Image (spheres, rainbow, N blue to C red):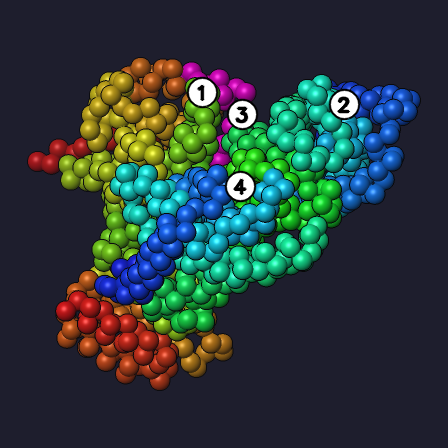
Amino acid sequence: MVTGTGHRSHGERTSKLSPGARLYVAVVVAAAVAVLARALGADSDLDGPVSQSWTMAVLVLLFLICDSAPAPVAARQSAWSPSSSVTLAAVVLVGPVGALVVGATSLFSVRRGLSLVQRVFNASMYGLSAWAAGQAYLALGGEVGPPGHSSFPGIIGPFAAAAVVHVLINHGLLWGMLLLAPASEPGQPRGTLQRYLPMLVLSDLGYASLGLLIAALWSVGGAFAAILVLMPLFVARWAIGQFAAQERAYASTMAALCQAVETKDWYTRGHSERVSRGSVMIAREVGMRGRRVEAIRYAGMLHDVGKLGVPTTVLQKNGALTEEELAAIQLHPMRGLAIVREIGFLDEALAGIMHHHERMDGSGYPMGLAGAEIPEFARVIAVADAFDAMTSNRSYRGARSIEEAIADLRKWSGTQFDPALVEAFVAALKREGWEQPRAATVQPADGVAVPDHDDPAAALRVVDSK
Amino acid sequence: MGEPAPGESWRQATDSGELLLVAAAGLLVVAAVAQTAAAGLVQPRIALAFGALISLGEVLRLSLEGGRESAPIGSAGAFGYAVVLTVGGKPALQPALQVIAVVAAGMVLGALPHLAAGRPAGLAGMASRLIGVAVVAALFRPLSTIVAITRPGDWGLALAVMAVVLVIGWLAECLIGALISADALRARFRVALWDEMRVQLPLGAAVAATAILIAFAAGMMGLVALGVFIAPLLVTQMAFRRYAGIRATYLETVRALARVTEVGGYVEDGHARRVGQLAVVVGRELGMSEPELLELEYAALMHDIGQLSLRDPIPGGATVLASPEQQRRIAELGAGVIDQAGVLDGVAEIVRYQSWPWRGQERQPPVGSRIIRAANAFDDLVGASAETSRTVAALEWLRLDTATEYDPRVVEALAKVARRRHRSHR
């Protein structure tokens, strides 16, 4: 099951809720309370939960154990826990209303940093999804109570329907919340959750089926069956947590190494990360998904790694270059490729690194490809790369404003950049904004004015060697 | 997306241990199949269902860290078949040898798609999994009639016996894995066993719990239980696959990016990688565990990253010839870069102290730093050359400085692995 989890401070979170989000929370909570109130009015609905108070107690305990130790996904925005299997077991054992009560005990789960609003929302969301799952189960002819030999395989159909309904409503309600409540770090978390979503839905469906096993083994010995079921659940939780931790570690290590590469030139500090961010914005805008977005994120980060192979004296040379020096600069995408080739990237990312200095009119380097011959990743990176170069300080000029840079991108659109990608970038910039680097205050030791090879306005010049 | 064991290229040429293991498992299978064929297959429907699950599990193999291989779904099915007491209310009667034969058949069938796709058959992995199952079957099948008949309906006893037997089977698998890696990688057996148990624990616990659940659920639900169990195990497996994948990519990336110093002309070609491999084998020789070795490998790969901050490369790139102050500065700068990552504190620490003499300072540098110091000096002196005379001269050079500069234990370990390498090259 997926929950919205907190930021570190409760007050901050509640005060940040927009009116729309507040209304949304209120509607969800009201729906849950209404369903519960109706059930309390009808005696027949309460037979299950009341007559089986022992079963209810064990289920609630089990649910709280699962719900109290979620694995964080996507930068503290939401968390995943295997508790859906317990609510679904409750659907079979004690019926929809009992399941609602079990889900609603999420209010008391032992988790730090959850505000009251979040707890109430989570409890209502779980309660509603459990209740709806129970209704689906009953509608397809599922029987409430511990299943016996004769229940199989007939019970599987209704149970599967209940599981699907449960996952859909859980994710649907949470999705609505995430859409309405803007994240504290703009642009990032929604996309990150998107990456994890298919995995989360599949995990939930998978673990939902364990709910049937808890129910099936209940008559044999409730608590012991529960312990056995908990084991694989927590192993999966552990693995997902490990995966997320490794992925974060990977991203920050990569960023640190890229920064090391940038120490060669004070003015390009943070360039790789910004190009990576810009490339991802364009990629999302043109509809790339999942692994391709991941690949372009890293391709953007690593696009200039090959600059290390260019002697510092050439990179920081003032004025015109000799033929040899020009060749050294023009080879840097190839050198970059040589470094990253052994990383198990998509081929596309490699092509993006190698060709990010090609131009649409065929006058770029290293191969002089033109138009659609240039790989899509390379065209994307080229736009983000030039944009960041223009909006950053250079020793020979100050940073240009975003509007000026957009105008320049449009000016060279068609000759240098892919027009469709330029427009996609402009659209994404309008929506998500752009954080320009702080003005570089440190001068290079020797104070030379260095034309940046990424700067579309500062074309590389060759001296007449004669 | 397997993550190669560190120091792969220093492996022994012949994996005699693996050969022995596969031969033993082969003999076991021949005996089991012959016996089963002679006696006839008991309850063929149950055998078929479990065999199919095991095949599927074998198709969906999984790479774990350190180049280990696992087939959690297959193992859960196999262990489940070994400990199942009743199916749909009727007693399950398969003898231990039939369990072995069915599991072996399922595994072989499941390995065929791997062969067809051009991947290795993974005989050693299959053999060790099979022996684990054989241990469980041999212990539990004779008991099963007693457990089931004397106390009908008492699940507590059955559960306890199953749990104990499965733990023994898991330990047997770990023992085999440790013996193999101790033999192939020259790891110390105790360290290898500990590493094996650490890696196999989470998945092993899930597999054992699932096997017991399958056994009980099959008693209640019949063979449908197998179908119901595939989904959750697939999910666990998917989580593990992604985890193993990102681990492997991480290592690959650090290995690749460590080459930036080479492309930048700061150090000789292949220096980072050679120092990384040498440091790992030396570390293993000194009894370091796998997590420590991984940290050491990262540090060794990135030990020269601080040179990027130098305006101009050191001539020839050999830090061993640079002045102590300069070495220390490079180490500090490198550690600073790694500190930026925020997740590799141990690695940064190793890199920071790599230029320190091992004795005579206010504190002793960590063992990883001492290893990298020696391995770096060795590689600066020998390079990619495989000449015995150069190796001997370099070792002699290091030995002369063991009073303060190089840790004598590290130098002796280095000498040992260098000797071994020359022997295997000849």
Write down the quadrant of residue B376 in the picture: bottom left
Disc 3/disc 1 C-alpha distance (Å): 19 Å
Which amino acid, by three-letter code, is at mark 2? Val
Is A438 inside the magenta-drawn segment?
yes
**A381 up-or-down from B235: above or below:** above
Is B142 inside the magenta-drawn segment?
no
Which amino acid, by three-letter code, is at mark 3? Gly
For disc 1, the chain is A
In the image, is A19 to the left or to the right of A271?
Answer: right
**Same subunit: marks 4 and 1:** no
The range drawn in magenta is A422-440
Q: Secondary structure at mark 1?
A: loop
Which residue in the protein does label 3 denote?
A: A433
Q: Secondary structure at mark 3?
A: loop
Disc 2/disc 1 C-alpha distance (Å): 32 Å
| Nearer to me, A141 or B177 | A141
Callout in the foreground (2, 4): 4
**A431 up-or-down from A272: above or below:** above
Disc 2/disc 3 C-alpha distance (Å): 32 Å
Give residue A287's mark. 1
Which residue in the protein does label 4 denote?
A: B233
CB-based contact (under 8 Å), mark 3 and mark 1: no
